[in-house]
Image (cartoon, helix red, strand yellow):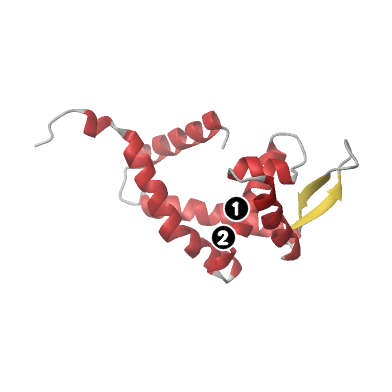
Amino acid sequence: MWGMGVAEVDGGPALFRLVRFWSRRWAGRASEELTGESRHVQHILVVEAACTSADEGEPPTVGTVAHQLGLDHSGASRMVKDAVEAGYLARDTSARDRRRASLRLTESGHALLAGSRQWQREAFEELTAGWEEADRRQFGAYLRRLADDVGA
């Protein structure tokens, strides 16, 4: 019998169980619903990363996408190239440094981002459907706080 102890307050393993669950089951489903193909998860990731970088006040670049996704520059560059070819991002010359390219969401990229955010809200609602409204709000606030604290 476990009793009151570390297992009941140990959020680390629970967090990573959720991350594993989410990445295996939900990411492909989101991509399928939003882009028509489960293999386009990367487009959603790149658009989300570019938007997060833009929210920080600087136009996103391949480097900022790489940082947001935890990738090396060449991996992020390939993903950005694919998102540009798919019509979700456009490359512009940086106003601050003409040697660098800045990224911006296209109309399709904004639509994908809006669809992604709506899908995320619906997934949260589905996952917490049996919870009291106060618990859902508090959990949502804690998730936002954690994401903000780690710069995600």
In this rendering, the answer to whether 83 lies above or below 138 is below
- Location of residue 52 (image quadrant): top right
Return the residue at label 1.
45
**Extreme residue in the left direction:** 1
Image x and y of residue 128, in percent: 36, 49
Given contact means CB atoms under 8 Å apart, are the residues at marks 2 and 1 in contact?
yes
Position of 86 with respect to 114 (left or right) is right
Q: Residue at x 49, y 58 (%)?
A: 27
Residue at numbered disc 2: 41
Reply above or below: 142 against 84. above
Position of residue 53 measured from the top left corner of the image (x, y, whole percent): 69, 40
Q: Residue at x 22, y 34 (%)?
A: 7
The answer to whether residue 122 of the structure is visible from this angle is yes
Q: Quadrant of the N terminus?
A: top left
x, y percent for residue 152: 56, 37
Q: Nearer the viewer, residue 115 or 66?
A: 66
Q: Is residue 34 left or right of residue 95?
A: left
Q: Residue at x 64, y 40 (%)?
A: 67
Q: How many marks?
A: 2
Q: CA distance from mark 2 to mark 1?
A: 6 Å
Q: Could you say whether the residue bearing mark 1 is in a helix, strand or loop?
A: helix
